[in-house]
Amino acid sequence: PVLGDSTPMASTVHTATATAAHTGDASAAHTGDATVPPLRFDEGAALVVPDGDGLTLLDRDGAEVWARTWSELVGPCDTCGGEGATLDGDGLLLAFPTEGVTTGGAVARLRGDGALDWRVDGFGFPHDGVRAPSDAAVIVVETAGSRLRWIAGDGSSDEPLRVLDGGVPGWPGSLPNGAERFDDGWVPYLLLSHRGIGDPRPGAAQANGFLTLWDLSDPAAPALVWRFPAVGGLGAPHGAVVRWVECRRWLVWAHSDGLARGGTVGLAWLDDGTA
């Protein structure tokens, strides 16, 4: 999910009006004539929730303001599921499996009015897609391949422009499953979550997930800044993000299996650039 900050972003966002919304009944068809508030993928305006059925936008009170199935969003996609949803200018980048959770997948871009801009297939269980800071390429997080793949930013091809995988010094692999792009001054960073392999319960010998931060200043040579935790592991971390709250920079992530009976949320400070 794309979680709104405590203060709405000041950036200009697209405000095209959608004219077909779900009625709220999961079994109902689109009404066709119901007008919903302007679509705003602005972090301060909506919670964007991709799931097994499709994509839903919720307002600050948790009310549904817009929803579509995967087939309505990206074409025939009866076996698609939800993974990543990332702000992209006035639109949204989506990553989703197309053949189950361990095989094929695709990335797509929605325009500001919710219409499909492009879709590219041919990825190994993609979990996220984010823009590269240097050339506007799309960085695709391929969990099944334990790698990142840079592709053309206009969605014209799935051919890799660059890759970050086992052939790059410092690349740890371990099933990357989430990406967050942010800048600190003039330095472009990429924050990744790595699920890890094995028993994800805290304290288990094989709880080996972790987070990594990468400096993308040199597009041809991403540099590992840190790994968190430096010792030990996390229980199946997903979706790490960086947020400013009350003048402090927070690192927030989900432990999908943080407890024996459910998940937890992890928090750390990034006051000096390290976790």
Image (cartoon, rainbow, N blue to C red):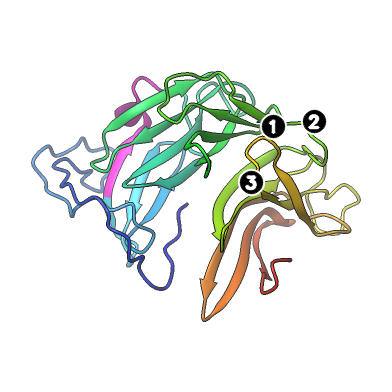
Position above or below: 81 against 46: above
Secondary structure of the residue carrying tag 2 is loop
Q: Quadrant of the C terminus?
A: bottom right
**Residue span colored magenta:** 66-77
Query: Mark 2 = which residue?
Result: 166
Q: Left or right? Give the position of 228 relative to 58.
A: right
Query: Can residue 68 be found in the magenta stretch?
Result: yes
Q: Are marks 1 and 2 in contact (CB under 8 Å)?
A: yes
Q: Amino acid at mark 2?
A: Gly
Crowd tier of the residue under label 2, counting other residues whose Cα lies within 10 Å: few below 14, some 14–19, many 20 or above? few
Task: Pick the residue in front: 154 or 78.
Answer: 154
Residue drawn at (31%, 30%) of the image = 117
> Which amino acid is tagged 3?
Leu
Residue type for callout 1: Arg
Residue designated by label 1: 147
Dot 3 falls on a residue whose secondary structure is loop
Tell me: residue 92, above or below residue 48.
Answer: above
**C-alpha separation, residue under disc 3 versus residue under disc 2:** 17 Å
- Give the total number of marks visible in the rendering: 3
Q: Which residue is mark 3?
A: 216
Res 270 visible: yes
Pointer 3 or 2: first along the chain = 2
Residue 20 place in picture, x, y as percent: 16, 40
